[in-house]
Image (cartoon, rainbow, N blue to C red):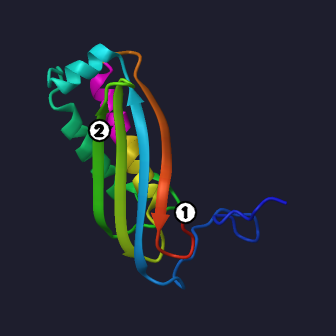
Amino acid sequence: MAQNLSHINSDGEVNMVDVSAKSITLREAVASGKIMMKLETFQQIQQGNSPKGDILTTAKIAGIMAAKQTSSLIPLCHPLPLHKISIEITPDESLPGYNISSIVKTKAETGVEMEALTAVSITALTLYDMAKAIDKSLTITDIKLISKTGGKTQN
């Protein structure tokens, strides 16, 4: 038997989950992903020789902004007060490309997994957008939730 979906009510209709009875706790989510590219593209970005400027800083800012807009992008997400959004873009010549990670924290009734995943996704998409003029082989991959803490469900 399939598990009940939290965003479907007893009549089978889509609804936003009622979290009003949950306790406000410190919650944190960590997500990660990768963007792969040609070695020449990677080296050009690392040297700061992109025709579009500072690609890595722009991507990091985009990821932070996206986390703050998650409830506007994903219809049934709760708007949350975010207390920390951290984005790391780590060069990895063996890909070649970048490993992206995000950490998002809040004190709220529900978790910040979607915010962490959105931050990684938009960081990767911004890297893609800013490098696509010099590399048509860019690949975004492995976007996933690494961990979450707070509330009843943890991994």
Per the rendering, the mark at residue 155 is 1
Residue drawn at point x = 15 percent, y = 28 percent: 53
Counting every numbered tag in the picture gives: 2
Q: Which residue has dot 2 on it?
A: 90
Q: Residues within 10 Å of mark 2 (few under 14, many from 20)?
A: few
Q: Position of residue 76 (x, y in %)?
A: 53, 61
Please, what is the dominant secondary structure of the magenta stretch? helix
| Magenta stretch: includes residue 108 | no
Q: Position of residue 150 (x, y in %)?
A: 46, 73
Residue drawn at point x = 43 percent, y = 82 percent: 24
The residue type indicated by label 2 comes to Thr
Residue drawn at point x = 63 percent, y = 64 percent: 7
Which is more N-terminal, label 1 or label 2?
2
| Above or below, 32 relative to 24 | above
The residues colored magenta run 123-132
Q: Quick check: 102 left or right of 152?
A: left
Q: CA distance from mark 2 to mark 1?
A: 24 Å
| Above or below, 77 relative to 32 | below
In what element is the residue under mark 2? Answer: strand
Q: Toward which corner of the image does residue 138 lie, by quadrant?
A: top left
Residue 81 seen anywhere in this rendered image of the structure: yes
The residue type indicated by label 1 comes to Asn
Quadrant of the drawing holding the N terminus: bottom right
